[in-house]
Image: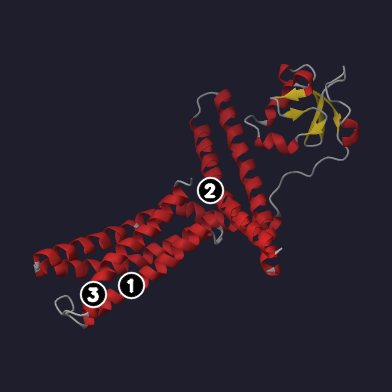
Amino acid sequence: MKKDDLKEYTGKDGKPAYIAYKGKVYDVSKSKLWANGIHMANHKAGQDLTANIVMAPHGEDVLKRVTLVGELEDKEPDLQIPPDIQLQVNIKEKYRQLYKKFHPHPVLIHNPMGLFVFSALMQAIYILSKDVSFERAAFYSTIFATLTTFPAILSGLFSWWVNYETTFTKIFKAKIIFSAILCVTSIIVCLLRTLIPNIYIEEGLLNIIYNSLIFLNVGFISYVAYNGGKITWPS
Amino acid sequence: MVKANKARISELEEMIQIVLLAIPREISAREFYLSAVAKATSDASRTMFLNLAEQEKGHEIWLRKILNDLKTELGGLKSKN
C-alpha cells in the first residue's frame, strides 16, 4: 500500500480506519479510541503517524491491540539523530555522566557567592564601626572569593559544553559577560588593597573605587546566579 | 527586509534557548524512568516505565533535530546580515 492509498481509509463514510506506523499499516476501525477515524480529537486515520507516536503519552505497544493489515511502500524514514549530532552526543555522554555524578558547578558556585557577600558585609560593618578587624576580614574574604571564582567559572563552562553545546543564548551571554567582569573587578580589589595597604583609610578616589567594587561584586555575582536560576527553573 | 531578518533572528534565538534548556530535562526524565524500571516490582509497571523512558528518548531526538534546524536557519540569516 502507498501513502496515497492509505488516505482513502479515513474511517468515515463506512470506510475502514487505517493508520501507518514504522512502515506497517494497522486497522483501528474496531478501536473505541478511533471512533469516526479520529483519535483524541487530534489524529486522523488515513495517515502515517510514525512521528506522532513518539510524542504520544503512550508507547507503540498499543498497536498490539489492533490488526496489522499490510505494509507501507513509501514509509517515512526512521526517526534518528543525524550522524554528526550522534557523534557529538556519544563523545559527551561520558563527561555528562561525570557531571551528573558530581554536579561541580552548583557545588562550586556557592563558594564565591557566599564569600563576596560576606566580604561586603564585613566592609559595611568596618565602615560603620571603624574596627579594622572587620576590614581585614573583608579583604581576606575577597581574596578567597576571587580564588574560588575561577573553579566556579571553569565548571560552568564545562556544564555549558556538556549540557548546552556551548550555544550562545541571552542567559549564557549574561553569565559569561558578568563572570568576566567579576573576575576583573575582584582582581582589582585584591591588587588595590595589596599595593596600597592603607587604601581603606586614605580618603580619595581610590578609596571610593575600592569600596564601590567590594559592594558591586555582590551585584555582579548575584546577576550571574540569577541567570543560573533561569537555567534551572526556566519560565 | 533587514528588520524582518532581525525579528526572525530574535525569534530563533528565543526558540533555541527553550529547546536547549529542554534537552537535559528529557535526558534526566529518561534516566529517572530507567531507574524506576530497575525498582519496578511487576512486569506491567516495568513495561510502563520502559515505554515512558523510550518516549523521553524520542523527545530528546526530536529536540536535537529541531535545535539543529534552528541553528542552521540562524546561521544562514546571520551570514546574510
Front disc: 1 or 2: 1
Image position, residue B46 (x, y; %): 56, 28
Name the residue type under label 2. Answer: Pro
Discs 3, 1 touching: Cβ within 8 Å: no
Residue at x 26%, y 70% (from the top left corner)? A212
Front disc: 3 or 2: 3
Q: Residue furthest bottom?
A: A195
The label shown at residue B24 is 2
Left-right relation of A93 to A219? right
Q: Quadrant of residue A82?
A: bottom right
Residue at x 15%, y 69% (from the top left corner)? A135
Rendered view: A182 above or below A82: below
Name the residue type under label 3. Answer: Ile
In terms of depth relative to the viewer, which is nearer, B40 or A150? Answer: A150
Image position, residue A159 (x, y; %): 47, 58
In terms of depth relative to the viewer, which is nearer, A88 or A13? Answer: A13
Q: Quadrant of residue A168?
A: bottom right
Image position, residue A128 (x, y; %): 12, 64
Chain bearing tag 2 is B
